[in-house]
Amino acid sequence: KQSGRGFVTAGNTTRTGVSWEHLNRLQQKQGFVTPQQLEAMLNLTERLTGKGQLGQSWIAKLLKAVGFAPGYRISGPQALLTLVSPRTNAAVRKMAAENLLSSVALGNTVLTLSKVAGAAVVLDYTNSHFGRIRFPGSDTYYNIWGTDQVLARTIAQAVAGQATDRFGNIRDVTLKNALSNYLRSGEDPVIELANEILTGETYLGEPLKWDLKSARKVV
């Protein structure tokens, strides 16, 4: 479809621009770029722009079949691994640090300015909307962190042993619950719909019954 081609074109254009910027910076600093540095830099650029590497194993193929954009979901953690891995080239590690810190700083600036402007910013790390913004007069929570917010929230809830919904209700959460919810949040919509019908509850933990009210929830 045209929308799909447009999305891919936009992603490739962004990655090309970032790659050229990183390449020019390396050349200006070192005067040369080794093949190893070039490969590591291109891999980092893909991770920073939302393109993760899943591989071709049967697990990867399964994730692609039943998951919703699994490559995008794993790109953030892989970018962080590039930063902390001892095998990463020093120059590429510095690029990773600069880009990740800049991203966090920009996100925090957006949250701060939004709060100053009167928007509600969720700072409770056990809340399902942690790190999101809700503007006055709206019930919509805006997520500027992508799927990294879901992972951070999952880790926080697992460590704290509790989760808070949008209304402030607190429930106990085990590591198994937190991991299950994280995996469900990345399921293909059709798979998640089937999962909700089989388990008798929504992703948010709301009970489902064979009635009109539950049908509306599913829709």
Image (cartoon, rainbow, N blue to C red):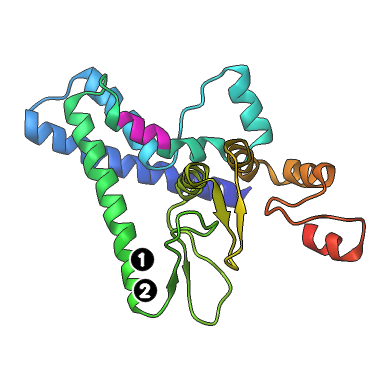
Q: Position of residue 33 (x, y in %)?
A: 16, 24
- All told, the count of numbered labels is 2
- Label 1's element? helix
Please check the rendered image and state whether residue 22 is part of the magenta-colored stretch, yes or no: no
Nearer-the-camera pick, 168 or 29:
168
Q: Does the image show residue 98?
A: yes
Residue found at x 25% / y 47%: 101
- Label 2's element? helix
Vertically, is 12 above or below 140?
above
Q: Which residue is mark 1?
A: 111
Is residue 116 rendered to the left or right of residue 153? left
Residue found at x 82% / y 64%: 216
Nearer-the-camera pick, 37 or 4:
37
Q: Position of residue 126 (x, y in %)?
A: 50, 54
Residue found at x 68% / y 42%: 188
Is residue 116 rendered to the left or right of residue 27? right
Is residue 87 rendered to the left or right of residue 51? left
* Image disc number at residue 115: 2
Q: Position of residue 17 (x, y in %)?
A: 30, 44
What are the residue bounds of the magenta stretch?
A: 77-82
Residue found at x 62% / y 45%: 185
